[in-house]
């Protein structure tokens, strides 16, 4: 008996996700931003430690300061909001590093996919492990030592047309062995 399901809304959402770098400037409600954080917190984490912290930013001066200091986050100048995904080293487990990077990456992907489903645009702008970028975010947001910013996600309503990239390639698939 074939129990496989036909691709549904979830797969469609995954395959239609795209990086958006231009925004209308229309504000995103606090309720939607909190819903994005809720989606992030639904991610799996090693040993269920949930070593993440989310900083939601809507203040123009803070968004502009981050845009000024981060070389690949200039779209923050027009984004009405951002979510900074951070690792909380005090929750990272037995070792100082733990799996916070993997856990926060899973949370980030959940946020990106949730935003796509809500009709919002986002883009993952990397911070960690670049020391100079980590310093910009830590200094701008006054982060304590045990909080490490992984990325900054600009959030807003997309301006213009954006299309997902088809990244599928059979060369990256190996069956049973290399």
Image (cartoon, rainbow, N blue to C red):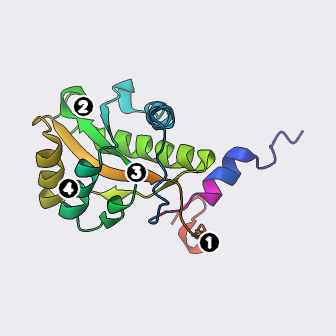
x, y (%) of residue 68?
A: 20, 63
Q: Between disc 1 and disc 2, whose residue precedes?
A: 2
Which mark is on residue 65? 4
Give the foreground label among 2 and 4.
Answer: 4
Magenta segment: 14-20
- Judging by the rendered image, the residue that carries numbered circle 2 is 92
Whether residue 163 appears in this view of the structure is: yes
> Which is nearer the N-term, disc 3 or disc 4?
4
> Contact (CB < 8 A) between labels 2 and 3?
no
- Quarter residue 79 falls in: bottom left
Residue sitting at x 23%, y 48%:
62
Where is residue 74 drawn, in percent x and y?
Answer: 31, 66
Within the magenta stretch, is there residue 101? no
Coordinates of residue 111 in the picture (x, y in percent): 47, 43
Q: Secondary structure at mark 1?
A: helix
Mark 1 — residue?
170
Residue beneath disc 3? 80
Task: Tell me how far mark 2 sits from mark 3, CA to CA.
Answer: 31 Å
Q: Earlier in the sequence, mark 4 or mark 1?
A: 4
């Amino acid at each position: 008996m074939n129990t496989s399901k036909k691709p549904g809304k979830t797969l469609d959402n995954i395959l239609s996700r795209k990086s958006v770098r231009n925004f209308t400037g229309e504000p995103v409600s606090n309720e939607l931003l909190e819903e994005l954080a809720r989606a992030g917190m639904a991610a799996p984490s090693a040993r269920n430690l949930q070593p993440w912290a989310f900083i939601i930013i809507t203040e123009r001066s803070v968004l502009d300061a981050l845009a000024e200091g981060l070389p690949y986050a200039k779209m923050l100048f027009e984004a009405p909001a951002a979510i900074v995904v951070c690792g909380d080293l005090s929750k990272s487990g037995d070792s100082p590093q733990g799996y916070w990077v993997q856990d926060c990456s899973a949370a980030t992907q959940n946020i990106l996919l949730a935003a796509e489903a809500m009709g919002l645009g986002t883009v993952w702008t990397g911070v960690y492990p670049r020391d100079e970028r980590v310093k910009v975010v830590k200094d701008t947001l006054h982060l304590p030592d045990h909080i490490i910013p992984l990325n900054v996600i600009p959030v807003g309503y997309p301006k213009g047309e954006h299309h997902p990239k088809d990244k599928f390639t059979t060369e990256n698939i190996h069956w049973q062995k290399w």
